[in-house]
């Protein structure tokens, strides 16, 4: 399996680190960003990832704004998985036209399944 | 017109409505003695007229002297009664003829005496008797006619009075109907409308339009209900936001804890050993975070129930400032907390609560200055109080939102790019309540885009207020 690169956009530093750790252990290459703006810069700099894990509520640039700009600039070139603590996570995903969603708190297995599904 | 004025008007109308039949009754009662007097005089007159019959009998028996004597007496009586009637205001048309006839007969009798009666021959005597008979007869007739005319007139007057009473009764009924319509239209109907609105608001229907027209008390009530509706709407919205934010805020540390534990499950040996210190500190930090959220929520509900009690102790304010700044500096990533001035002051206050206030203010300063790292803290003594300020050079607060920032569940940055910053909208609300309970003040200056400075003051020789504010 070719090494897939995943971009984790999450403002909580612990969660960002832990997600990265978990995915790295599964053999993915993980890039992190603490908000939408940093994520966009990272895409410019490091190229398009194979999958984006996106938190919604973040300072400076939130998930909504990020997905809007991402679609405009990059024509939705990578699938987006929304990670949200909102009650209606499916609704959140539909709001921004994401490809899948994970409701916080999630099982690590759920995360892996979701990532695998998205990459195949 | 106010309701008071309307009720006053209704009372006045009712007073007059009740007065009218009362006045008629009083009027007829006042008339009664006079009417009785007239009736009595008229019946006396009729009685006198019957006496005339006797006089006529005497004349027929040729006892002229006796007849003359009787006649003059009766005539005097009749004259007296007629004068009575005149005194009582009876119209002359009722008694004029009677008076004239009476005068004529009297003159006739005065001209007659025993002496010249004896000189009268049979023809003359018969003529006199006939004359007297005729006049007497006339007089009796006139008297009876007078009586019946008066009875008819009295009857007519009675009928008229009855008509008046009926007319007034109709008028009173009309006044009452009008008043019913007027009061129900201008008081009861608006109240029914208002009651409907309040019931709808009670069901949570905040978009209903409350009538505020009318410059009376109901209009004012409508305005007050509208204001209450707006407040309720805002509070409900804030509470809904608070619940959703609280759920969100609670889920974040739970997610971190869960992910940490699951990661550890998949580890062993050296890897687990290396991960352990991080895991433990994370668990500790997230538990603190969860605890703070729970404490905040409880404090808010306690404050709402006005149950908060201050545990006043004597402590050094400058030590507290140093301690808080040191702790906050550890937690914040990259912000520079600078204590510009820290006067040595000892105060009586609830140390935990004042610490909470200071932590909240510094926490806000850190959260809302993502791009500027400098935060200045100052504590100085000003005569009888100590003033602590926290200044940041961050995003500031928009003018339009400055009025509400101390309200509970209010998040000044909701809907802006900074909304996502961890906030439940209770920090400043709690801070203000705590400071007020100490008899202090909390204020701020803020310019959007340039930063904010929050000040709070505490009295030094504190007589702690245990009141609500």
Image (cartoon, helix red, strand yellow):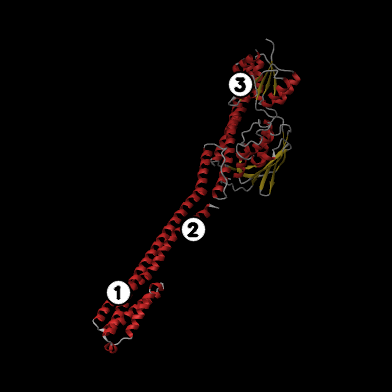
Given residues B396 and B439, the one toward you in this image is B396
Q: Residue B226 shows which numbered tag?
A: none
Q: Which of these two is toward me, B60 or B315?
A: B60
Residue B326 located left or right of residue B221: right
Depth order, front residue of B99/B246: B99
Find numbered disc 2 in the image and state the secondary structure of the residue it sits on: helix
Q: Chain of mark 3?
A: A
Q: CA distance from mark 2 to mark 1?
A: 52 Å
Q: Is B432 placed left or right of B121 in the picture?
A: right
> Do discs 2 and 1 share a chain?
yes
Tell me the residue that label 1 is attached to: B47
The secondary element bearing badge 3 is classed as strand
Q: Are marks 3 and 2 on the same chain?
A: no
Residue B329: image location, x then y, percent: 69, 33
Q: Which residue is mark 2?
A: B12
Residue, disc 3: A102
Query: For this view, does B89 lie left or right of residue B188?
Result: left
Q: In the rendered view, does B416 fall on the left or right side of B97?
A: right
**Crowd tier of the residue under label 3, counting other residues whose Cα lies within 10 Å: few below 14, some 14–19, many 20 or above:** many
Residue B390 visible from this viewpoint:
no
Residue sitting at x 61%, y 21%: A102
Query: Where the C terminus of chain B falls, by quadrant?
Result: top right
To which chain does the residue with label 1 belong? B
Figure check: B371 above or below B64: above
In this rendering, the answer to whether B453 lies above or below B28 is above
Q: Earlier in the sequence, mark 2 or mark 1?
A: 2
Q: Position of residue B298 (x, y in %)?
A: 56, 35
Calculate the distance from the C-alpha at mark 1 to the C-alpha at mark 3: 124 Å
Q: Name, please, the residue furthest toward the top.
A: A1
Using the image, determine if residue B95 lies above or below residue A108.
below
């Amino acid at each position: 399996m070719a090494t897939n690169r995943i971009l984790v956009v999450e403002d909580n530093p612990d969660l960002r680190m832990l997600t990265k750790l978990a995915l790295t252990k599964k053999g993915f290459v993980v890039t992190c960003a603490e908000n939408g703006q940093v994520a966009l810069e990272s895409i410019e700099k490091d190229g398009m990832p194979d999958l984006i894990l996106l938190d919604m509520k973040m300072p400076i640039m939130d998930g909504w704004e990020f997905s809007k700009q991402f679609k405009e600039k990059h024509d939705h070139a990578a699938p987006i998985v929304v990670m949200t603590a909102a009650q209606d996570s499916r609704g959140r995903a539909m709001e921004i036209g994401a490809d899948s969603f994970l409701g916080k708190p999630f099982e690590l297995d759920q995360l892996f399944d979701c990532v695998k599904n998205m990459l195949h | 017109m106010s309701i008071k004025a309307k009720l006053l008007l209704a009372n006045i109308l009712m007073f007059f409505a009740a007065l009218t039949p009362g006045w008629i009754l009083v009027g007829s009662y006042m008339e009664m003695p006079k009417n009785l007097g007239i009736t009595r005089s008229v019946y006396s007159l009729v009685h006198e007229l019957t006496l005339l019959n006797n006089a006529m009998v005497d004349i027929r028996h040729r006892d002229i002297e006796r007849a003359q004597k009787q006649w003059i007496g009766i005539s005097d009586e009749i004259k007296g009664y007629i004068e009575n009637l005149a005194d009582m205001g009876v119209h002359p048309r009722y008694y004029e003829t009677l008076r004239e006839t009476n005068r004529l007969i009297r003159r006739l009798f005065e001209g007659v005496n025993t002496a010249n009666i004896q000189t009268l021959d049979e023809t003359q005597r018969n003529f006199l008797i006939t004359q007297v008979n005729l006049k007497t007869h006339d007089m009796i007739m006139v008297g009876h006619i007078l009586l019946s005319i008066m009875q008819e007139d009295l009857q007519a007057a009675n009928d008229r009075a009855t008509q008046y009473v009926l007319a007034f009764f109709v008028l009173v009924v009309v006044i009452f109907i009008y008043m019913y319509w007027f009061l129900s239209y201008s008081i009861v109907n608006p109240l029914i409308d208002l009651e409907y609105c309040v019931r709808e608001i009670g069901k949570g229907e905040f978009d209903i339009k409350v009538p505020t027209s009318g410059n009376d008390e109901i209009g004012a009530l409508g305005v007050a209900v509208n204001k209450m509706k707006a407040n309720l709407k805002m509070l409900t919205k804030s509470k809904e936001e608070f619940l959703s934010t609280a759920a969100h805020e609670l889920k974040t540390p739970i997610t971190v804890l869960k992910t940490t534990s699951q990661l550890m499950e998949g580890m062993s040996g050296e890897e687990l050993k290396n991960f352990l210190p991080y895991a433990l500190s994370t668990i500790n930090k997230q538990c603190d975070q969860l605890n703070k959220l729970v404490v905040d929520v409880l404090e808010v509900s306690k404050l709402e129930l006005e149950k908060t009690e201050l545990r006043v102790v004597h402590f050094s304010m400058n030590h507290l400032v140093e301690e808080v700044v040191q702790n906050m500096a550890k937690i914040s990533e990259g912000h520079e907390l600078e204590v510009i001035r820290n006067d040595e002051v000892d105060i009586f206050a609830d140390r935990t609560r004042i610490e909470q206030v200071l932590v909240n203010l510094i926490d806000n300063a850190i959260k809302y200055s993502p791009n500027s790292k400098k935060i200045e803290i100052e504590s100085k003594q000003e005569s009888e109080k100590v003033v602590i300020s926290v200044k940041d050079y961050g995003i500031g607060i928009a003018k339009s939102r400055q009025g509400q920032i101390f309200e509970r569940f209010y998040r000044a940055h909701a809907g802006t790019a900074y909304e996502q910053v961890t906030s439940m909208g209770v920090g400043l609300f709690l801070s203000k309540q705590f400071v007020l309970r100490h008899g202090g003040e909390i204020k701020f200056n803020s310019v959007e885009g340039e930063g904010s400075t929050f000040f709070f003051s505490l009295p030094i020789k504190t007589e702690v207020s245990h009141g609500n504010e």
